Amino acid sequence: MKNFDIVKAETEAVQINPEGWVVKGSFNPNEAFGITTEKKEPTNFLTDLVSWATFFIWAIVSIALIYSALLLIFGWGDEKQIARGKDGIKYSLIGLVLVIFSYTIVKIIQYVGTH
């Protein structure tokens, strides 16, 4: 049995050991997570910051929406719990719309700034 198998990647050969680890290659974790590193400009940092902040807020809004839905489902006739669930869903959806609009506005400003 060979120690290494040679596998053709997109442009170069990559060696993989028997455990499946890449020994030699051009894997860039920044590219895998969508982080731009080619240009060292402040706009790239701001773009990454806005992307991560949008993802974080999106996650919080999603958790709040699920929690509010569970309050509504398991309220079982308790008017206080049902009201909390309805308000939570309403505010979560408002937050979701605000996140979408804010991300869209930032992308429009970035597009106008670069063209």
Image (cartoon, grey):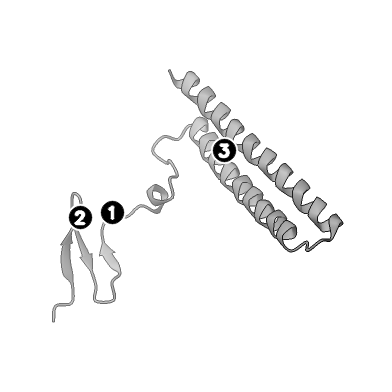
Lateral position of residue 62 relative to residue 10, left or right: right
Mark 3 vs mark 2, CA separation in Å: 32 Å
| Residue 32 screen position, x and y as percent | 39, 51
- The CA span between labels 1 and 3 is 27 Å
64 sits to left or right of 112? right
**Hey, what amino acid is under mark 2?**
Ala
Residue for badge 3: 50
Look at the numbered discs 1 and 2 and tell me whether their residues touch, using CB distance below 8 Å. yes
59 lies above or below 15: above
Q: Identify which residue, 91 or 6, lies in the foreground.
A: 91
Quarter of the rendering occupied by the C terminus: top left
Q: Residues within 10 Å of mark 2 (few under 14, many from 20)?
A: few
> Quadrant of the rendered structure where residue 96 is?
top right
**Residue shown at 63% from the left, 36% from the top:** 97
How far apart are labels 1 and 2 at the CA level?
Answer: 9 Å
Instruction: Name the outermost residue toward the front.
Output: 77
Residue located 28% across and 72% down the image? 20
Q: Which residue is mark 1?
A: 26
Which disc, if any, is residue 9? Answer: 2
Residue 101, given in percent of the width and then of the height, sits at 60, 31
